Image (spheres, rainbow, N blue to C red):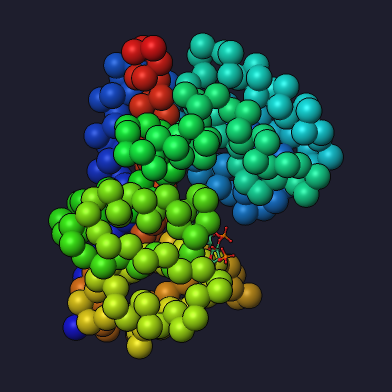
Amino acid sequence: MSAKIIDGKKIAAEMREALKERVKKAGPGLAVIIVGENPASQVYVRNKERACIEAGIRSEVIAFPEEATQEAVMARIDLLNKDPAIHGILVQLPLPAHFDSRKVLDFISAGKDVDGFHPCNMGTLFLGNPGLQPCTPHGIMKMLEHEKVEIRGKHAVVVGASNIVGKPMAVMLLSKGATVTICNSKTRDLGHHTRDADILVVAVGRPNLVTGDMVKEGAVVIDVGMNRLQDGRLCGDVDFDSASEKASLITPVPGGVGPMTIAMLLENTVEAEERSWRR
Ligand code: NAP
């Protein structure tokens, strides 16, 4: 079987277009905080800013130097939490080593937490109530919906159990009726689990960890990994060539999950504003 490629860029573009109507009715504002000079973070922040401008969302990038104190960053978040013109606040990770990232993220008001990382939003997700959801797994669910992938009763295997991708991904799939297996770095015989997956989501950060022989014939394969190779190329966690021989649907890297994550950030910002009217 040769897999159909899921065009994340195209689906994300459609979603961003559809969002423009909602943006017109509102006037959402997003604040993005970046600390230090991590080149990858700077690219991510620039891409988010560009996407906001294109969608008509006001965005403000607040850059702190590497040596900034946690107190200074939190004092700024405090102001943004109280600012009625700002509906979404995002802190670009990773923060420098002298920061307690959890403490900083938890300080963002849950209603403005457009990354969906706040314990209130995570709790809401686990309880199955509507709330601001983590952008990457939410974007993947939208992609599966767009491709009309049946989730109910299927075996979904999530490789990677981080708070920002793997864990919320597993909960979202579970809530749609999948039987879910979550794997981590201690999992014995990873292939034994992945080979049984109808839906396989890989979010680890290791180039080509999952090869074609670890994929079930006809599986839907979602590659979240974003790894920069020595020659500068970007690659995922799945060996695309061998896996696409087995899968029925597969996401490429780049052009798969990444654009969906940004589209969901924009949607969460609009959602946060709409929710602020209802409060
Ligand atoms: P992370 O916080 O480093 O978590 C990695 C997870 O993978 C951990 O749960 C770890 O297990 C597990 N793991 C490590 N080695 C493994 C192995 N050999 N077999 C099975 N599991 C293993 O990473 P993350 O933030 O979730 O990101 C994962 C990847 O996705 C990265 O490449 C990142 O750049 C990418 N990403 C992409 C987007 C996007 O929009 N495209 C968004 C977010 C992240 P333990 O829990 O046991 O340590």
The reply to whether residue 55 is visible in this rendering is no
- Residue at position x 55%, y 47% in the image: 44
User: Where is 84 relative to 270, above or below?
Assistant: above
Q: Quadrant of residue 180?
A: bottom left
169 left or right of 115 in image: left
* Percent position of residue 108, x then y: 59, 28
* Percent position of residue 49, x then y: 51, 36
User: Where is 82 relative to 128, above or below?
Assistant: above
Q: Residue furthest front?
A: 127
Along the line of sight, the residue nearer the viewer: 43 or 212:
212
Along the line of sight, the residue nearer the viewer: 193 or 113:
193
Q: Quadrant of residue 270?
A: top left
- Residue at position x 21%, y 65% in the image: 154
* Percent position of residue 116, x then y: 47, 38
- Residue at position x 51%, y 40% in the image: 117
Q: Quadrant of residue 269?
A: top left
